[in-house]
Amino acid sequence: MKIKTAAKINLALDVTGKLPNGYHTIESVFQTVGLYDEISVELTESGIKLTCEVPEEFASSDPIPCDERNIAYKAAKLFFEENSMDCGCRIHIKKGIPSQAGMGGGSTDAAAVLYCLGRLTGKSVSKPEKLGADVPFFLTGGTAYVEGIGERITPIADYSGKILVIAKGREGVSTAEAYRSIDGLISPRHPETQKLAEAVISSPRTAYQFFGNLFEQAVELPEVEDIKTAMLDGGSFRAVMTGSGSAVFGIFGSAEQAGICAEQLRSKGYFACVCETVPDSFIELEK
């Protein structure tokens, strides 16, 4: 079975606290976007084999492990163990989502493996969050208000069809390092996440005014600021870093305007693409 599996952006992201176990609590609006990895899964008699195709521009910034350390491999292992199955599978990942970008590239791959194995066997796993806090979101996709450590997911109004430019430089951000920086902030300005969730429902055309990300105050990357400036100068209504970084998305009024901006960013050496917000995580290519 072969599917395309979507990336996500955080339209708004706030960190609201820290638990005794060290995990941070968040409030966020997650949104799937039309930037995809391609995942192929085939059942075999035994064992899990994982292969990867990674563009050089991604691999150079953050080498992606293509063995049992990969979250997609761990997803297959969890699926077979939880369902007491003695078979195996072959997994191939063709990366289209930049890594260390704050776009859930690993989590969406894990969700895609769970989805494919579920379609192939008729079974499922009970707690996909064991693999990572973002994995359950990708099993539903669309637009959602997310709380807790990422496990409380409330779907909200469809926000698909919005035109975006997504761009990323060579610099990546370690999530753990980004959260340590968050802990050191003094009197930070918190994004109005709940107002955004309400605006997506009541006034989606102007909801972008509530986009925001607390991590922008903690993660200082010149490339992020340069990309944001280029997007705003290029006509973006709003430009915001996603997740703990380092990708940036800008929302535009037309595909033509977005295309011109993306080309300008590529001419400066950045990865940049035009896409839209989408209502689902998965697109089946082959059954």
Image (cartoon, rainbow, N blue to C red):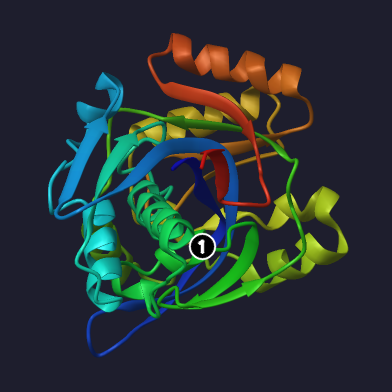
Q: Residue at horizontal 22%, vertical 54%?
A: 73
Q: Quadrant of residue 49?
A: top left
Residue 127 visible? The answer is: yes
Residue 192 visible? The answer is: no
Q: Is residue 95 left or right of residue 281?
A: left
Q: Is residue 17 left or right of residue 263?
A: left
Q: Amino acid at mark 1?
A: Leu
Query: Which residue does the numbered mark 1 point to in the structure image?
Result: 139
- Which class describes the residues within 10 Å of circle 1: few (<14), some (14-19), or many (20+)? many
Residue 257 location in percent, x, y? 72, 19
Q: Residue at horizontal 29%, vertical 37%?
A: 92
| Pick the front one: 229 or 260 | 260
Q: Is residue 201 left or right of residue 192?
A: right
| Callout 1 secondary element | loop
Q: Quadrant of residue 124?
A: bottom left
| Pick the front one: 260 or 217 | 260
Q: Residue at horizontal 19%, vertical 67%?
A: 86
Q: Is residue 186 left or right of residue 72?
A: right
Q: Residue furthest top?
A: 267
Residue 23 location in percent, x, y? 29, 78
Please count the marks in the image: 1
Q: Residue furthest bottom?
A: 20
| Pick the front one: 41 or 74 | 41
Residue 222 location in percent, x, y? 35, 33
Q: Residue furthest front?
A: 45
**Could you tell me which quadrant the N terminus lies in?**
top left
Residue 37 location in percent, x, y? 42, 37
